[in-house]
């Protein structure tokens, strides 16, 4: 038992290292091994892939890494996510539709991994999900809420320069007269509860599991 655990721990550390070292093929291989070893998909993400992305982000910030390092690390994580998405879906019981979520990364922001993870997890938890992708113009969010009658909107922003766009979207919903129809939840690295309160969002979560809990609380 303990040997298995320690092997699993080693596998997760190896996934983290492969992201940091910029070896996307290895990241994918190790992710496949972790799935075969029956490590839960969320554990692979939260204890293998994400710590690697965080280290890469820190090294970028300190000037040790440059943009190509971010791009290579992201490609490893995205390819692994493609393997993990069906696993995430399969492990959640299909439940009665809890609501309809429109989600996207706001205008000017092309970070998509966290946004997509939230979308996948919400879909696996019974929400109908419309993922609009990245760099989504404010008016497209408004139009999609109108078209689908969604009761939940998720806005992702990973940059301090794009988090203000989350406020723009909320203002645009007000101007369109549909702010009352939809609960707005926000997320992304520079965002917190204080920012959610400042811009009048209905909630904030710092990861995908938190997003599900929040969504169920708001519209479940
Ligand atoms: C990968 C990456 C990139 C990739 C993105 C590839 C892709 N296809 O997504 C690329 C290389 C394109 C990139 C580009 C840039 N990046 Co970048 N990037 C990152 C990095 C390393 C990891 C992000 C990631 O995927 N994390 C893993 C996922 C799973 O986590 P997450 O995104 O945080 O999402 C979770 C939560 O935040 C939350 N969440 C996310 N969205 C939502 C939405 C809702 C509704 C809810 C409830 C929750 C929620 O749940 C998610 C799941 O748990 C971060 C560093 C970091 N530690 O965040 C920098 C980082 C975000 N990038 C940064 C910068 C500066 C840039 C660039 C400006 C660099 C440049 N000079 O060009 C450009 C900007 C491009 C643009 N216009 O958007 C800075 C931002 C600094 C700041 N405060 O503004 C960071 C923090 C790096 C750093 N430490 O300096 N980047």
Image (spheres, rainbow, N blue to C red):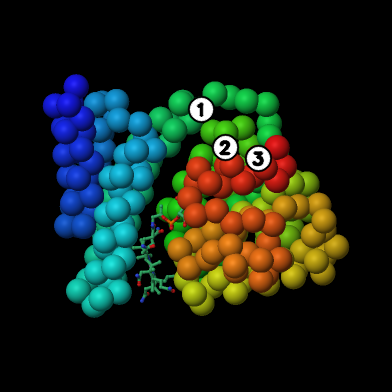
Query: Tag 2 or tag 1, which sits nearer the N-term?
Result: 1
Q: Quadrant of ligand 1?
A: bottom left
Residue behind label 2 places its C-beta within 8 angstroms of ligand 1:
no
Q: Which residue is mark 3?
A: 216
Q: Is residue 142 above or below residue 42?
A: below
Q: Is residue 13 left or right of residue 128?
A: left
Element type where label 1 sits in the image: loop
Name the spot of residue 93 as percent of width and height, x first. 54, 23
**Quadrant of residue 5 within the rendered picture:** top left
Per the model, the C-alpha gap separating discs 1 and 3 is 15 Å
Residue 31 - label: none
Residue 92 - label: 1
| Residue shown at the point (48%, 31%) measured from the top left | 89
Query: Tag 3 or tag 2, which sits nearer the N-term?
Result: 2
Of marks 2 and 3, the one in the foreground: 3
Total tally of numbered discs in the picture: 3
Inspect this view and state whether residue 105 appears.
Answer: no
Q: Is residue 176 left or right of residue 202?
A: right
- Sort mark 1 into few (<14), some (14-19) or many (20+) by Cα contacts within 10 Å: few
Q: Is residue 27 above or below residue 39?
A: below
Per the model, the C-alpha gap separating discs 2 and 3 is 12 Å
């Amino acid at each position: 038992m303990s040997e298995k655990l320690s092997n699993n721990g080693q596998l997760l550390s190896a996934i983290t290292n492969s992201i940091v070292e910029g070896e996307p093929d290895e990241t994918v291989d190790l992710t496949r091994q972790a799935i075969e070893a029956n490590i839960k998909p969320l554990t692979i993400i939260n204890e293998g892939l994400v710590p690697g992305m965080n280290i890469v982000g820190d090294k970028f910030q300190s000037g040790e890494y440059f943009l190509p390092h971010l791009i290579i690390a992201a490609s490893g994580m995205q390819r692994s996510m493609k393997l993990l998405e069906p696993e995430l879906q399969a492990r959640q019981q299909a439940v009665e539709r809890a609501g309809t979520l429109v989600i996207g990364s706001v205008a000017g922001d092309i970070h998509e991994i966290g946004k997509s993870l939230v979308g996948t997890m919400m879909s696996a938890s019974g929400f109908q999900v419309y993922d609009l992708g990245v760099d989504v113009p404010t008016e497209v969010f408004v139009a999609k809420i109108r078209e689908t009658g969604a009761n939940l909107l998720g806005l992702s922003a990973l940059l301090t320069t794009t988090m203000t766009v989350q406020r723009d979207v909320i203002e645009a919903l007000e101007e369109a007269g549909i702010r009352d129809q939809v609960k707005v939840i926000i997320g992304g690295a520079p965002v917190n509860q204080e920012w959610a309160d400042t811009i009048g969002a209905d909630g904030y979560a710092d990861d995908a599991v938190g997003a599900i809990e929040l969504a169920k609380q708001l519209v479940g």
